[in-house]
Amino acid sequence: MNRLNGKLSGGRIRPRSFFEPPRAEDLPTVSLQMKGRKFDPGMVIGTARRCVFGLPSVIVCSPLRDGKPFPTTFWLTCPHLVKLCGALESEGAVTELERRRMERPDLWTEYNLFHARLRLLLVQPAAARFLRKYRRGVWDTLRRGGAGGIDYLSRTRGGAKCLHLQAASWLALGFHPAGEFLHKALVPLHCAAPAASGCVRRC
C-alpha cells in the first residue's frame, strides 16, 4: 500500500474524518469572508479547517451543483490566506509548484487520484447509482477530477493550477506532495485579528 493509499481505511475513505458539519455561525462567517467573490452557500457541506480563532479557513463543497460536477472540494475562505496566496502567486509560487510537480509527477498524480476517490465518496449512494447508470459523462468527470477538478490523467491539463486550491487541500487533509514548500510559504498562517481580515463584522 503506497503512502497516500495508507490514508484509506479498509480500502475506503471515511469522509467525515476530514471535516465537520457546518456550525450555525459558519455560513454567515463564510459569507462575510467570501464578500466580492461568487459564492453559493448551498454548496457548503462542512468545515475542514479552522483558524486559531475557531473560524472557518477551508470549507468542503458538494461535488455536484445542479446535477453538474463542481470541481472544488476544498475552498480556501480565510481572507488572510487568500490574500497571502495571491501575493505569492504574483511572485511565482505556481511556477515553483509546477517545478516540484515535474520532479515527482507520480506523487502528484497519486494525490489527485486520492482527491477523485474522496469526491466520489461524497456523492450520496442513490445519486452515485443514478449517475453511473444514466449520466456516465458526469460520473467520469467526477472520477477524473483531482484537486480543484484537475484532470490527473491528462498530460496537458494536469498542472498545479493555482496556489489557493493547493493550499486549501493541504490545510484540509494535512498532507500534500509540496507540503514542505506550502508550510514554509504560508507564513503567517493566521491573521492577527478576524475583524481586520473581514471574518467578523466590525462593531
Image: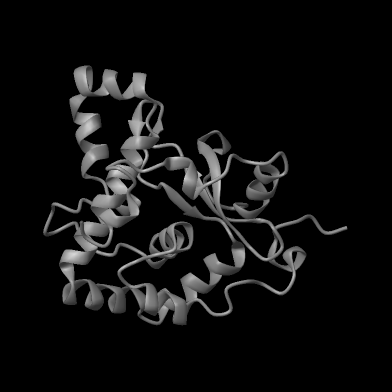
Q: In this view, does 159 lie to the left or right of 18?
A: left
Q: Is residue 150 visible?
A: no
Q: In which quarter of the image is the N terminus?
A: bottom left
Give how far across and how far down residue 169 sits, in percent: 41, 58
Q: In this view, does 120 lie to the left or right of 55?
A: left
Q: Is residue 102 left or right of residue 23?
A: left
Instruction: Answer above or below: position of 146 versus 85.
Output: above
Give how far across and how far down residue 111 sits, in percent: 27, 58
Instruction: Answer above or below: position of 98 versus 118.
Output: below
For the view shown, which residue lies furthest in the front direction? 10
How does the figure colour the protein chain or chains? one colour
Q: Can residue 28 be seen in this view?
A: yes
Residue 138: name its quadrant: top left
Give how far across and how far down residue 3 sits, in percent: 26, 62
Tag count: 0
Give how far across and how far down residue 162 sits, in percent: 36, 64
Identity of the residue drawn at 60% across and 68% down: 80
Residue 95: name its quadrant: bottom left
Instruction: Answer above or below: position of 43 versus 148.
Output: above
Q: In which quarter of the image is the C terminus?
A: bottom right
Residue 188: name its quadrant: bottom right
For the view shown, which residue lies furthest in the right direction? 203
Identity of the residue drawn at 68% across and 41% down: 23
